[in-house]
Amino acid sequence: MKRPIFIISSLLFIIVVLSVARVALVNSISTTGIELANLETEMKAQKKQNELLKEQYLQASSFTNIEAKAKELGFVEAKTQVYLSEPLPLALKQ
Amino acid sequence: MVRFRLILFIFVFLFFLIVLRLFYWQVVRAGELASLGQAQYGRQITLTADRGEIKTSDGFEIAANKLSYLIFANPKEVKDKERLVDVLAPILAVDTASISALLALDRFWVPIQTHVEDDVKNKIEELNLPGIGFQEQSIRFYPEASMSAHLLGFVGKDNKALDRGYFGLEGYYETQLKGKAGVAIVIHDASDRPILAKMNDNAMRADGKNLVLHVDRTIQFILDRELKRGVEQYGAVGGMAAVMDPKTGGILAMSSFPTFDPRHYGEYSDDLYKNPFIANTYEPGSTFKPLVMASALDAGLIKPDTKCDICAGPVSIGEYDIRTWDNKYTADETMTQVIQHSDNTGMVFTGRKLGLDRMLSYFKKFGIGETSGIDLQGEALASLRERDQWYPIDAATATFGQGITVTPIELLTAFSAIANEGQRMEPHVVRMIQTADGKEIQIPPKVLSKPISSKTAKVMTEMMVNAVDKGEAKWAKPKGYRIAGKTGTAQIPVEGHYDANKTIASFVGFAPADDPKFLMLVIIDRPTTSIYGAETAAPIFFKVAKNILNYYGIAPTE
């Protein structure tokens, strides 16, 4: 008498637990779509910002731009270079 | 008891039936139901592949991608078309008629303008104009403007209006650069929000591979600047030059003028697109002499102090007379002096020692009459005439680089043998290919041939150093450096005869002579201030060479 009751009760308990678990799972997934959309939007915005900054960086560091800026600041081409080939009259700490 | 067991059995049996049915719908028919679901709620999106970037040796992106927008309109949603046209036309700098014509079409979607910059797009977006939308696009972007335009090529459209590279690196490496677009299906709910569900595998999408070049941005900048100045200063039609690392064949810089802006290639004539350094053929003139001299030295037929016994005056061959460029003759001139004075009669002497067959054999070893194999689209082939078409006068004039045509890259590659201990290297612009997932594929240097021994290369180098130190261009040479070089002044053939006033002036050389770090060829097309290579191409060569030596921190040795 006890055993059948035990088996039936166990089955009922499992059914109830699984039902509750399903409801909880569906509930949690239902809002992830919104989160996914938000993440996608943010990722797109960051990617766009990244590309714009990269474009600015490349423009700013191009030699064409640097030469123009250097001329504006009054820099001129170096006409001579000096190479130190004779040993210096100094004792260098090794 | 029996009844309880019966009831239990019924429950278990029903449970089993349900499980079986679930198995049928969720496993056996799963694929079919998923497809049905996707068809109902899924949306197919094309994942465009990013085009690979092109970087110089320091990692700077000389050809990159930049964000832009396609502005489109839905004419059926636009109520006040006139107002929209009046607002958009000044912002987009487009005439009102073209926008009006597009809005008059009976369509749901019309493109108004492509490749619109981000700030312009934001300005229009703020106006909240009904019926106007934006689609992201990627366009090619060249931060250094027209620097090395011929080397890069440009990205245009193919017959399906898709991006495609033309000329230069964009053309040659089109397959690696373009990547592969993918397709994905995203499931959306009734409110158009994405559902975290299984998506189609989008692993088919593959971004283009990046190219890392041998090109040194500093050397490229110097070469562009000095060549442009030189072409203007000497009143030339144009000019071209390239710098190579003779030990690896790596192209450190390549430049041509006139040039074009790859961002606005459509505004230039088609003729400007091809790279003259690889696509044009010309008669090299005296810059060819070291190759012939090195061949005779290598064959053991002459030595640097061998005396020329026909150099006392012009040399007659049939009805022709071979003369020196300045009509000055020195009896018993040594081979070293022949190169120093750029003596055509001395070269005829050398050619006779070699004989035509041996000379042609050495030409083949030096790669004359073959393409160099450089990794750029558009290389021309300057074929040599067949053996039975060589007459004595042709054999004679070929020794001083007339009556024979080469491409500049062919000549530069041949000289790499003299600068690199006898080994001729395959020229290469790309050093390494980077895949989207970070793998690096190195392109190793390749030896094409060994036309001369390293001993011959050393001897020829010394003769060329002597030519620079004591020849016509010595006034332009930077002090304190041992530079090997040779001037060239080739007359241009016009309608069967040579025009005495129109020349291709050139200079080829490498430095430092004892351990060459770079090899360079400069060609000036039809200079007007002077026709001679010693007075036009040579000064440009030495200016660039001095800048490169300083850039490399190589101190003078003399």
Image (spheres, coloured by chain):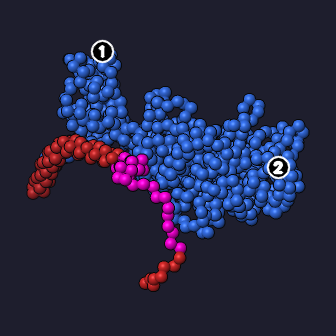
Residue B527 in view here:
yes
* SS at badge 1: loop
Q: Is residue A64 magenta?
A: yes
Q: Quadrant of residue B195?
A: top left
Rendered colour, chain A: red
Q: Position of residue B254 (x, y in %)?
A: 55, 47
Q: Quadrant of residue B502?
A: top right
Mark 1 vs mark 2, CA separation in Å: 77 Å
Name which residue lies at 67% across and 45% down.
B532
- B343 displayed left or right of B254: right
Q: Position of residue B339 (x, y in %)?
A: 75, 55
- B201 displayed left or right of B396: left
Rendered colour, chain B: blue
Chain to which mark 2 belongs = B
B133 or B156, nearer to the observer: B156
- B389 displayed left or right of B6: right
Could you tell me the amino acid type at mark 1? Answer: Ala
Chain to which mark 1 belongs = B
* SS at badge 2: helix
Among the two numbered marks 1 and 2 on one chain, the one whose residue lies closer to the N terminus: 1
Q: Position of residue B228 (x, y in %)?
A: 52, 44
The quarter of the picture where the C terminus of chain A appears is bottom left
Q: Is residue A84 magenta?
A: yes
Q: Which residues are magenta?
A: A57-85
User: What residue is disc 2 on?
Assistant: B345
Same subunit, labels 1 and 2: the answer reads: yes
Residue B44 in view here:
no
Discs 1/2, front: 2
Q: Position of residue B233 (x, y in %)?
A: 55, 43
Could you tell me the amino acid type at mark 2? Answer: Thr
Name which residue lies at 19% across and 29% down.
B128
